[in-house]
Image: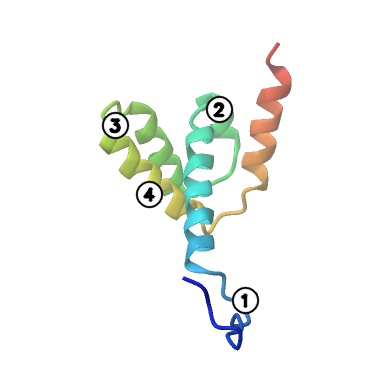
Amino acid sequence: MKRPSWFTEPERDPAHPSKSQVKRDLLALQDFGLELVKIPPARLEEIEMDERLREALAELRRLTNLPARKRQSQYIGKLLRDVDLAPFKRALEAGKLRRP
């Protein structure tokens, strides 16, 4: 539908992202959580993190049922919202550098 010529787009407040942007950010955190499962457990033990997150990652490794894995990855994404991701990103990068 074509908008009238007098219609102007409302100004977006950068402090309040759109609902779509929030969803994209949450999905990115879920995907990041799935990447963290690829880090060897011994290396994950070296990273300082909340015990709930550590247990959630261990649980995701254990799960094989697809709907259960999806719910668990959503939970991990929720936990990752309040965490500094830098140590995890460094661990992922270090793992990529070691692979032939």
Looking at the picture, tell me which residue is in the foreground, 79 or 68: 68
Query: Compared to 94, does 86 lie above or below?
Result: below
Residue name at image x 66 percent, y 40 percent: 89
The crowding category of the residue bearing disc 1, from other C-alpha atoms within 10 Å (few below 14, some 14 to 19, many at least 20), is few
In which quadrant will I find the C terminus? top right
Secondary structure of the residue carrying numbered label 2: loop
Q: Which mark is residue 86?
A: none
Hey, what amino acid is under mark 3?
A: Leu
Q: Which mark is residue 15?
A: 1
Residue name at image x 55 percent, y 27 percent: 39
How is the structure coloured here? rainbow
Q: Quadrant of residue 69?
A: top left
Label 1 – label 2 distance at C-alpha: 34 Å
Label 2 – label 3 distance at C-alpha: 20 Å
Instruction: Of the two numbered discs 1 and 2 on the same chain, state the one appearing first in sequence.
Output: 1
Q: Is residue 45 left or right of residue 79?
A: right
Q: Which residue is mark 2?
A: 39
Residue 21 placement (x, y as % from top left): 54, 61
Instruction: Of the two numbered discs 2 and 3 on the same chain, state the one appearing first in sequence.
Output: 2
Q: Which residue is mark 4?
A: 75
Secondary structure of the residue carrying numbered label 1: loop
Q: Which mark is residue 66?
A: 3
Instruction: Of the two numbered discs 4 and 1 on the same chain, state the one appearing first in sequence.
Output: 1
Label 4 – label 1 distance at C-alpha: 25 Å
Secondary structure of the residue carrying numbered label 3: helix
Residue 9 placement (x, y as % from top left): 60, 80
Label 3 – label 4 distance at C-alpha: 14 Å
Residue 38 placement (x, y as % from top left): 52, 26
Instruction: Of the two numbered discs 1 and 3 on the same chain, state the one appearing first in sequence.
Output: 1
Hey, what amino acid is under mark 4?
A: Tyr
Instruction: Of the two numbered discs 3 and 4 on the same chain, state the one appearing first in sequence.
Output: 3
